[in-house]
Image (tube, grey):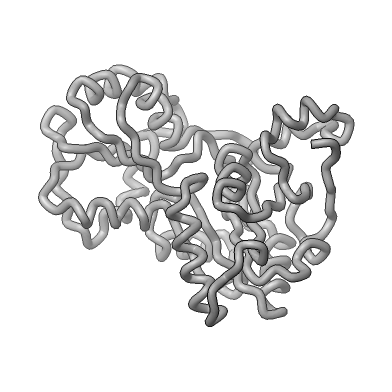
Amino acid sequence: MTSLRFVERLRDLVGGVEVVLSDIWGVVHNGLEAFPEACEALHHFRSQGGTVILITNAPRPADSVQRQLRKLGVADEIYDAIVSSGDLTRHFVASHPGRKMYWIGPERDSSIHRGLDPVFAPLEQADYIVCTGLFDDETESAEDYRAMMLQARERKLTLICANPDIVVERGDRLIYCAGAIAELYRELGGEVIFYGKPHRPIYERAIELAAERQNHPIALNRVLAIGDSVRTDLAGAHGFGVDCLFVTRGIHAEEFEGIDQLDPASLKELFGHPPRALTRELRW
């Protein structure tokens, strides 16, 4: 990597692009309010015949994500469909009927279980774990779960991570997500199945939905991913084989101060594989 391309506007990148796979939290909203210019940009892209699939590591079904978006002022018209890691986790639970689940996560994520009739059990009796987040992400960190994870490892339980994010913005703060617990468990030697970015299943499902709307197979060189996380959005796009527009004002904002002065070695360390371009915020 010798240089980075900075763009001010999405329209400068979407020539030949049929499908945008956009992250939500950090790109479209910050957990408290929508970003109007980002919403306008996606709406413009759709109005020109493009397809927008929102892909999110939210540990909830797509319809629950949609309701949250509406509350934050994000209009339905800016996207064609939503694919969430919660939907993929639900598929795992549905394919393991009768198995006992220990659930780690806040009550607000309970919609992930809706209609599945799961068998909940304490950790000592569970067959597997589903982690949607921390019980209290306002006060806890992954370290608060170390003893629990050691116990789970002793029982050789598989942990299903319904949100691979380590942290996410909530207003002007960063809070821990399910990925932080999952990574701790993996470091301790536990088995983890991750659903969501940067793993392929969420991208494969998004492309399926885009192909349905475009009425033809989607070539990956006509797809642009948008996100604000090196670990999930950028790595996921690269692993799937699509270009990425990287939004710098998200969770990595402090790291990008003075990025245009960084040397190639520092850029390589920061990004690994370079994005197609960077922008401070999404706008048309």
Residue with the most extreme right position:
261
Q: Quadrant of residue 74?
A: bottom right
Q: Position of residue 58 (x, y in %)?
A: 45, 50
- In the image, 165 versus 73, the foreground residue is 165
Residue under the image location 29 percent in, 57 percent down: 91
Drawn side of residue 116 relative to residue 262, left or right: left
Q: Position of residue 111 (x, y in %)?
A: 32, 55
- In the image, 19 versus 32, the foreground residue is 19
Residue under the image location 67 percent in, 34 percent down: 272
- In the image, 117 versus 22, the foreground residue is 22
Residue under the image location 45 percent in, 27 percent down: 139
- In the image, 17 versus 33, the foreground residue is 17
Drawn side of residue 216 relative to residue 63, left or right: right
Q: Position of residue 57 (x, y in %)?
A: 47, 49
Q: Is residue 9 above or below residue 19?
A: above
Q: Quadrant of residue 33?
A: bottom right
Q: Quadrant of residue 150?
A: top left
Quarter holding the C terminus is bottom right
Residue under the image location 53 percent in, 35 percent down: 167
Q: Position of residue 132 (x, y in %)?
A: 36, 42
